Image: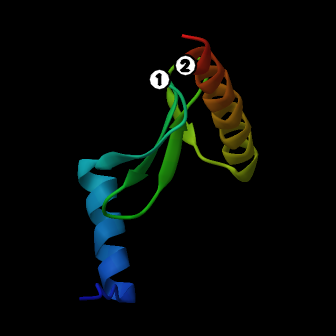
Amino acid sequence: MKKVMTDYGTRLSALCCSIFGHHYIVSKKVTLHIKEYKCVHCNKEVTTDVSGNLSNLTPELQDINNTLQDIYQKRHRATQQVA
């Protein structure tokens, strides 16, 4: 069953987010400390920055997160093979 969002639905969701705030869920775990989040209602994407605050997920930050995730996974794969 497909969920169809109309223009009215997205405006209403954006209005709810502006009044009540966003409802973020984790969309991607980059490392243990850095995650990407997505709002359930308006699909706004944010990520944690260096100081642990949420910042808008720009294409530059998304590229940094992807690179960081690759390095993190390679390091942990190597340590698991040694152990």
> From mark 1 to mark 2, how far is it between C-alphas?
16 Å
Give 51 or 21, whichever is nearer the viewer: 51
- Tell me what residue is drawn at x 50 percent, y 20 percent: 52
Residue under the image location 28 percent in, 49 percent down: 23
Helix, strand or loop status at disc 1:
loop
Residue 37 picture quarter: top left
Amino acid at pointer 2? Gln
Could you classify mark 1 by the number of other residues whose Cα lies within 10 Å: few (under 14), some (14-19), or many (20 or more)?
A: few
Residue at horizontal 69%, vertical 36%?
70
Q: Decide if residue 48 is on the left or right side of residue 6.
A: right
Q: Where is residue 72 in the image (x, y as percent from the top left)?
A: 63, 26
Residue sitting at the far top: 83
**In the image shown, does 15 or 29 lie closer to the viewer?**
29
As displayed, is residue 6 above or below residue 55?
Answer: below
Q: Name the residue under label 1.
A: 32
Name the residue that disc number 2 marks. Answer: 80
Residue 17 at x, y percent in the picture? 31, 57
Residue 4 point in image, percent of width and height: 32, 88
Looking at the image, is mark 1 or mark 2 earlier in the sequence? Answer: 1
The image's colouring method is rainbow
Q: x and y percent of residue 79 in the render?
A: 60, 15
Q: In this view, does 72 lie above or below 13?
A: above
